[in-house]
Image (cartoon, helix red, strand yellow):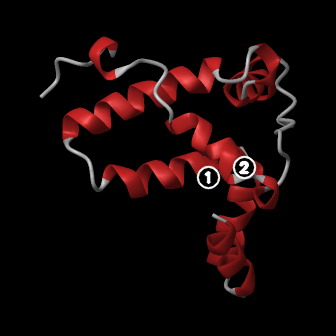
Amino acid sequence: MREIVAALEADDSSRAGDTVAVLRKRSPLMLHVSLRLVREARKLSLADELRLERDLVRHAFHLRPGTASETMEGIRALVVDKDQSPRWKPARIEDVTPEMVDAFFVSPSPKHAHPLRALN
């Protein structure tokens, strides 16, 4: 994600500027998670990809409890308070660590007990 944003910022076109402006408003952590999901999903079967996405959705609400959740902060800023000013943690794309992203890719369920274990 860092390299993508750096490349966009180095490009002086209006399209690149508009794109980086939108990216800078989004959750830095979830941008990293989404990019990794796209890259990893290419190697997975449909069933494994659906299991991974189900785990990611669960983590989006439960990995960080309550207001520490990126999902809940986005909802707060856009729907509840409508201040359009989410306070992301971390605040910058450059501050996201690999460990923060890795946590989203650890299944909360063992394979034998995963809710989507029967998918083939």
Q: How crowded is mark 2: few (under 14 residues within 10 Å), some or many (20 or more)?
A: many
Residue 26 visible in the snapshot: no
In this view, the residue farthest toward the left is 120
Residue 90 visible in the snapshot: yes
Q: How crowded is mark 1: few (under 14 residues within 10 Å), some or many (20 or more)?
A: some
- For the residue pair 65 and 20, the one nearer the viewer reads as 65
Q: Which residue is drawn at the image coordinates 40% and 32% (left, top)? A: 53
- For the residue pair 119 and 11, the one nearer the viewer reads as 119
- For the residue pair 42 and 72, the one nearer the viewer reads as 42
Looking at the image, residue 58 sits to the left or right of residue 94; the answer is left
> Residue flagged by tag 1: what amino acid is it?
His
Q: Which residue is drawn at the image coordinates 69% and 42% (left, top)? A: 100
> Residue flagged by tag 2: what amino acid is it?
Pro
How far is the residue under mark 1 from the one under mark 2? 7 Å
Disc 1 and disc 2 in contact, CB within 8 angstroms: yes
Q: Which quadrant of the view contains residue 73? A: top right
Q: How many marks?
A: 2
Looking at the image, residue 25 sits to the left or right of residue 98; the answer is right
Disc marking residue 32? 1
Query: Where is residue 64 drawn, in percent x and y?
Result: 72, 23
Up-down: is 19 above or below 29?
Answer: below
Query: Where is residue 93 drawn, in percent x and y?
Result: 76, 57
The N terminus is located in which quarter?
bottom right
- Disc 2: which residue: 28
The C terminus is located in which quarter?
top left
Badge 1 marks a residue whose secondary structure is helix
Badge 2 marks a residue whose secondary structure is helix
Up-down: is 57 above or below 85?
Answer: above
Query: Where is residue 20 drawn, in percent x and y?
Result: 70, 66
